[in-house]
Image (cartoon, rainbow, N blue to C red):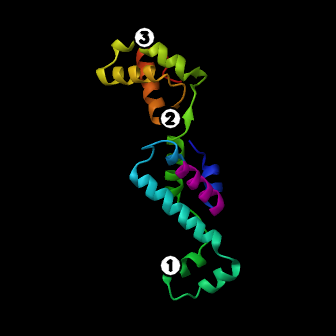
């Protein structure tokens, strides 16, 4: 989870926003179906908006203030800044694709093995999830899968609830 300080620092800098958005978009080349359609659209729009602001020189910004096209005038008049909601969503997307190797010092692979041994105490969906993880030999997981593994681990007594 991003801190408010980090969100503020990034959301007011168009170069940082563009780099973060383009970095996330680059992940689509390495992993299929990593983003939902709205997330892809959001990332592309944010990257384009920040690119447009970066491309304006001070002279162009001054000239654009009096443009007949409202979109150009609005772009020139305001400094680049994401809204709080946009910044939250950008960091939420970033956090959801981050790979994790451990939960509070306990390795993901070790946790998968231990949970797989006790998987019959879980419902059928979680049992299948653990079997798939175990078969895949995963050593790191993205946040949604990690949270599901954590929930199963707590349910099986392999992790304490505060971890």
> Which is nearer the eye, 142 or 104?
142
Disc 1 vs disc 3: which is toward the camera?
Answer: 3
> Does residue 68 appear in this view?
yes
> Dividing the picture into quarters, in which one does residue 123 lie?
top left
Disc 2 vs disc 1: which is toward the camera?
Answer: 2
> Does residue 13 appear in this view?
no
- Graded by Cα atoms within 10 Å as few (under 14), some (14 to 19) or many (20 or more), the crowding at tag 3 reads few
Disc ID at residue 30: none
The residue that disc 2 covers is 142
Whole-angstrom CA distance, mark 3 to mark 2, is 22 Å
Whole-angstrom CA distance, mark 2 to mark 1, is 38 Å
Q: Secondary structure at mark 2?
A: strand
First-in-chain label (2 vs 1): 1
As drawn, which residue projects farthest toward the top? 117
Whole-angstrom CA distance, mark 1 to mark 3, is 60 Å
The residue that disc 1 covers is 71
First-in-chain label (1 vs 3): 1
Q: Which residues are magenta?
A: 13-26
The residue that disc 3 covers is 117
- Graded by Cα atoms within 10 Å as few (under 14), some (14 to 19) or many (20 or more), the crowding at tag 2 reads some
> Dividing the picture into quarters, in which one does residue 17 lie?
bottom right
- The x and y percentages for residue 91 are 54, 48
As drawn, which residue projects farthest toward the right? 58
Task: Kindly check if marks 2 and 1 are in contact, taking CB atoms under 8 A apart as contact.
Answer: no
């Amino acid at each position: 989870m991003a801190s408010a300080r980090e969100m503020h620092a990034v959301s007011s800098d168009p170069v940082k926003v563009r780099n973060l958005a383009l970095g996330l978009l680059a992940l689509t080349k390495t992993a299929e179906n990593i983003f939902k359609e709205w997330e892809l659209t959001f990332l592309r729009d944010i990257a384009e908006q920040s690119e447009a602001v970066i491309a304006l020189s001070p002279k162009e910004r001054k000239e654009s203030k009096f443009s007949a096209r409202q979109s150009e005038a609005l772009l020139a008049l305001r400094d680049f800044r994401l809204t709080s909601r946009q910044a939250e969503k950008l960091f939420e997307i970033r956090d959801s694709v981050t790979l994790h190797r451990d939960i509070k010092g306990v390795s993901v692979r070790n946790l998968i093995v231990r949970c797989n041994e006790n998987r019959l105490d879980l419902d059928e969906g979680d049992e299948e999830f653990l079997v798939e993880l175990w078969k895949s030999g995963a050593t790191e997981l993205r946040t949604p899968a990690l949270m599901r593994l954590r929930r199963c681990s707590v349910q099986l007594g392999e992790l304490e609830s505060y971890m």
